[in-house]
Image (cartoon, rainbow, N blue to C red):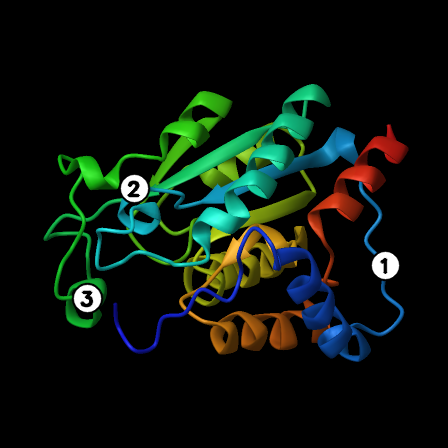
Amino acid sequence: MEPMKEEYFTDENIGSESDEMIDEVRNYAGMRLFKPDTDHMALLVIDMQNYFLNPDEHAYVPSAPAILPNVLKLMRTCHDLSVPVFLTRHVNTDKNAGMMSVRWQEMIRESDRRSELHIDILAAGGREIRKSQFDAFYNTPLEEELRKAEVTQIIIAGVMTNLCCETTARSAFVRGFEVVMPVDATAAYNYEFHLATFLNLAYLFTRPVKTKALIEAMHEAT
């Protein structure tokens, strides 16, 4: 395991660690509240693939298993409330990799079984969107699909917090979507990366929230 990686979320501490993160960034969020509109909402599950969830892979995110139950709870809630669910799957070719091939020495190919979505995510179900960059909107049909469904709010969950999740959150914001990203349904390589994202996003892009509170608010909104 690379030195930069750490298991900062575990099954036992994810609740308390998330509370501490929210307390640390709360002041940056001001008085802005997120009010779910389940008639115009979608869930975007980012890159919950074997490549990032298998402990034997060098790209393994140590805290990803701890967020998996929360991601699944969000997926089940959205299905129950008829909220569209999109599942991104990151794959690259030599042609579309761009700077990804410069930063990452190993690219994940569509034919590689490691690129497949985690079995529990597949079982929960959703519309698969294949992407080639950190931004899930870049050269994908995602925005078109969201506009067709009259979506104005997006929940973002998955990995990695500071790369694909944050980049997609910013991209959604500039496209006019309201974004919410649960602290305990996203994971990065380490605590510092995760906290840095929520310090940045809390200032303008999204108010920090826990999965349980978000789900309760979604049910209240129906």
Amino acid under label 2? Asn
In the rendered image, the vertical position of residue 178 relative to residue 194, given as above or below: above
The local secondary structure at tag 3 comes to loop
Residue 175 at x, y = what percent?
A: 59, 54
Amino acid under label 3? Trp
Can residue 45 be seen in this snapshot? yes
Q: Residue at x 63, y 36 (%)?
A: 74
Q: Residue at x 39, y 35 (%)?
A: 129
The local secondary structure at tag 2 comes to helix
Can residue 125 be seen in this snapshot? no
Residue 100 at x, y = what percent?
A: 22, 63
Question: Which of the pair 84/186 is nearer the observer?
Answer: 186
- Left or right: where does residue 12 sit relative to residue 56? right
Residue identified by numbered label 3 = 104
Mark 3 or 2: in front is 2
**Circles 3 and 2: CB atoms closer than 8 Å:** no
Question: Which of the pair 177/211 is nearer the observer?
Answer: 211
- Spatial CA distance of label 3 from label 1 is 37 Å
**Circles 1 and 2: CB atoms closer than 8 Å:** no
- Spatial CA distance of label 3 from label 2 is 17 Å
The local secondary structure at tag 1 comes to loop
Residue identified by numbered label 2 = 50
- Check the picture and name the quadrant holding the C terminus: top right
Residue identified by numbered label 1 = 33
